[in-house]
Image (cartoon, rainbow, N blue to C red):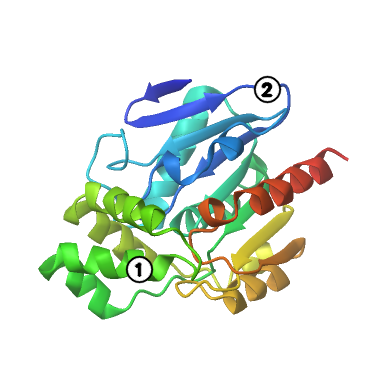
Amino acid sequence: MARKIVPLHYTAHLGDGPAVVLIHGAGGNHLVWPPALRRLPGASTYAIDLPGHGRSEGAGRETIEAYAADVMSFLDALGIQQAVLVGHSMGGAIAQTIALSHPGRVSGLVLLSTAARLRVAPAILEGLRTDFEGTVRLISQWAWGPDADPAWIERGREMMAACGSQVLYRDFLACDRFDVRDQVAAITCPLLVLTGSEDRMTPSRFGRWLAEQAPRGKFVLIEGAGHMLALERPQAVLENVTTFLGSLAA
């Protein structure tokens, strides 16, 4: 079911298990998560649209901390005291930030296609201001693995373009400012990092390092996938997330 808590739109699939919050990346929305992930068996799964994305109002944020505050407000509004946070790319940065600032509210982290630092090339930031359509096209081409369906690549481009230049620029600016490399060891909850072997935006070595630095981290490399991991390899991601949730309940 689709709902809205101002200013966030979200979908909810309610179950008897843990609360799981899916946080999309830059220029995305809740549809970056395939249906099976939005309906995790047994869990109460919430897939949100961050401000300025999808069906949520707003103009985006310029820092990961500001987006993290939006997610915390969402949790508070729904009365969710503790959740497993599942974040893709920028969403993974948001999830890490919440785990560091509110450790008691996070029972586990699943981080897809992300890192402890998200450096953005200056040419991308400049291009989003001077050649929005061309830069979005370039980002979209880099975001997928070599065997991705061209129709999916085009859908991804349309999703990103729909955010508009202001929101997308702010997203990438927030990513460029994000760096918690010196804090990863303080993430004490169970942590699973999933990265595609063909990810050109957040190469696998960064995900592996993140998992190795976290006290309870685990790294899984998914062969053949690019940056849009959940859409490229939905079954592999679903199996890993389901296994991780089961380990929390054990």
At mark 2, the secondary structure is: loop
Q: Is residue 214 visible?
A: no
Give the residue number, with chain letter if any, for mark 1: 141
| Residue 207 placement: quadrant | bottom right
Determine if residue 103 is in view.
yes
Look at 26% across and 56% down and name the residue there: 168
At label 1, which amino acid type do we have?
Answer: Gln
Badge 2 density bin: few <14, some 14–19, many ≥20, Cα 10 Å = some
Residue at image mark 2: 15
- 54 vs 207, left or right, is left
Q: For residue 64, which quarter of the picture?
A: bottom left
From the top left corner, tell me how far across and down residue 98 is, in percent: 54, 49
- Residue for point 44% across, 58% down: 149
Residue at the farthest left position: 130
Of pointers 1 and 2, the one earlier in the residue sequence: 2
Residue 94 screen position, x and y as percent:
48, 53
Residue 36: mark: none
